Amino acid sequence: MDFKIRKAVPQDMPRVLELITELAVFEEEPDAVEITISDLQTDGFGKHPAFNCFVAEVEGRIEGIALFYGRYSTWKGKVLHLEDLIVSQKMRGSGLGTALLDEVVLHGHKFGVKRICWEVLDWNEPAIEFYQKKGADVKRDWDVVHLNEIGIKNYIAKLEDARI
C-alpha cells in the first residue's frame, strides 16, 4: 500500500475533524467533541499555531493524523505532547500509525526535545501494546488531572468570592 505522510494544511481540517469524531466514538464519548473546523483552522495555522499536525494520505484521502504541540518540563526542558494519533478504523494495522509516530519522533528529535509524551486509555490494550512495542514507557502510576471549562469557571468564581 502506498501512502504519504505530510504536514497538514488548513484545507485538511474537515477530514481531521471527522477522524477526531471517529476517535471520540471509539472512546465512547461521541458528544464530547466541541471543536469546529474553524477552530482547527484558526488555532493550527497562522503566526502562532497552537498545534502541529501530520496527516497520512492513502490514494488522496486522509486516513490518519498525529496532532501535537510543544510543552516545557521543569525537569527536562523542551518536550512534545502528542495529543492524538488517530488512524481510521478501516486502516488500522496498515502501518499508518507507525509512520505517523515515526514522523512525530523525528520532528521532536530535530527540535531537540527531551521527551515526547501522550496518554492512552487504560482499556485500550491494542494501543498500549503498539506503544510498548515502539519502546514507550506506559506509566501506570500517574493519574491524568483535568480542569474542564466548567471547573475553570467555578475555580475563578471561588477566587472572586474570596476577594470580596
Image (cartoon, helix red, strand yellow):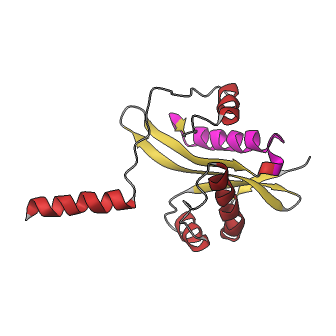
Q: Position of residue 146 (x, y in %)?
A: 40, 48
Residue 86, image x, y percentages: 69, 49
Seen from the viewer's position, the closer of residues 109 and 15 is 15
Nearer to us in this view, 136 or 20: 20
Residue at image coords 40%, 43% = 145
Q: Which residues are magenta?
A: 90-115
69 drawn magenta:
no
Residue 158 is left or right of residue 28, and the answer is: left
- Which residue is at the far bottom? 38
Expressed as whole percent of the image width and height from the top left, the position of residue 2 reads 90, 49
Name above or below for residue 27 compared with residue 136.
below
Residue occupying image coordinates x 64% and y 58%: 20
Coordinates of residue 96 in the picture (x, y in percent): 78, 45
* Foreground of the two, 60 or 14: 14
Q: Is residue 91 above or below residue 126?
A: below
Residue 36 relative to residue 127: left or right: left
Q: Is residue 95 magenta?
A: yes
Q: Which residue is farthest right? A: 1
